[in-house]
Image (spheres, rainbow, N blue to C red):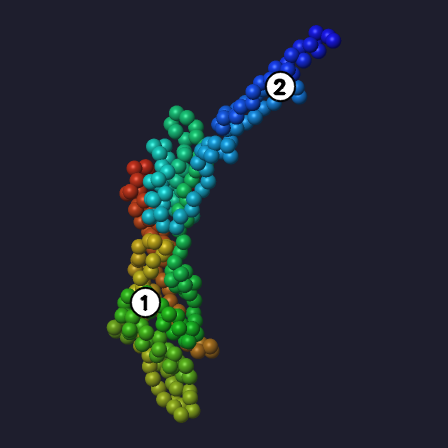
Amino acid sequence: MTLTDNAQVIVDTALRSTAPHDLEAGKYYAFVTPGGLQKVDLTGPEYTGKLARKTGTTTVRDAESFLAYWTKHRDDNSEVYADNERLTVTAVLDANAADEPRFGGHRLHLALRETTAWKQWLRNDGELLDQETFAEFLEDHVPEVLEPAGAEMLEIAQSFQAAQKVDFQSAARIGSGQRQFQYVETIQSKAGQKGQLTVPETFVIGLIPFEGSDGYRLTARLRYRIGQQGLRLGYKLDRPDEIRAKAFADVVKAIGEQIDTAVMNGTPA
């Protein structure tokens, strides 16, 4: 038996005689066995029960939820960005410190969601509808009409529904800021009988652009066309994009007033 063989026998004997013991979670081990160098890494979260760092992006839908999550996870180096084009607010909770880099992998994202009423009013903005469709839309959205009173707007909608078998001939602006439509009955029992419908040229609606945001007043201007398809009606909202931008700015302002970190204009890297 060679000297090398004798040395290996001694090593093998020592290994077999060593009492086994538990390895401690959270540590890294390296040891020599007859098969060579062996490594055991017990530093992972599956062994320690703890993540090395916070990661992931949480998406919320209103400023209140944003502030709740921010308060729980922020630190002195957390950053907040507002994107006016995307209408989003993003917080990098583990942003780089002034004197050391950090991961930037734990984020909070406020993605505002438009309300159903806002989307419905915007969908028909500038469109001309037939009498019945326009009347049904007004009936469905009476709660959002501020001026004139909802009862008056409902009466106008019902008048358009009742005036289905008529021939609209003209429309004139009258002194009270209203539009008066002249028509002639076409049903057999009333053929030739004339009538008129009076509708306000403008009406004011109250809408909440985003879920959880404040409400805003918008002016809607009556639009119409009398042609071969009969009377078609619609409305044009007064600068809805500016209202949406203001609503977003107010959300950002509400967040900025509750945190001690400057809200920067832009998006994080």
Q: Quadrant of residue 234?
A: bottom left
Q: Judge by depth and name the residue closer to the eye, 145 or 12.
A: 12
Task: Specify the amino acid type for callout 1.
Answer: Pro
Task: Specify the amino acid type for callout 2.
Answer: Arg
Residue visible at 35% across and 34% down?
75
Give the percent coordinates (x, y) of residue 76.
34, 32
Which residue is labeled 1 in the image?
Answer: 143
Q: Quadrant of residue 259?
A: top left
Q: Judge by depth and name the residue closer to the eye, 125 or 206.
A: 206
Q: Judge by depth and name the residue closer to the eye, 95 or 138.
A: 95
User: Looking at the image, which residue sits at the far bottom?
Assistant: 189
Is 179 situated above or below 24?
below
Quadrant where the C terminus lies? top left
Is 73 situated above or below 151?
above
Query: Label 2 neighbourhood size at 10 Å, few (<14), some (14-19), many (20+)?
Result: few
Give the percent coordinates (x, y) of residue 28.
52, 24
Residue visible at 37% across and 38% down?
73
Q: Is residue 255 visible?
A: yes
Give the percent coordinates (x, y) of residue 169.
39, 81
Give the percent coordinates (x, y) of residue 60.
40, 48
User: Looking at the image, which residue sits at the far left?
Assistant: 176
Is 184 situated above or below 20?
below
Which residue is labeled 2 in the image?
Answer: 16
Quadrant where the N terminus lies? top right
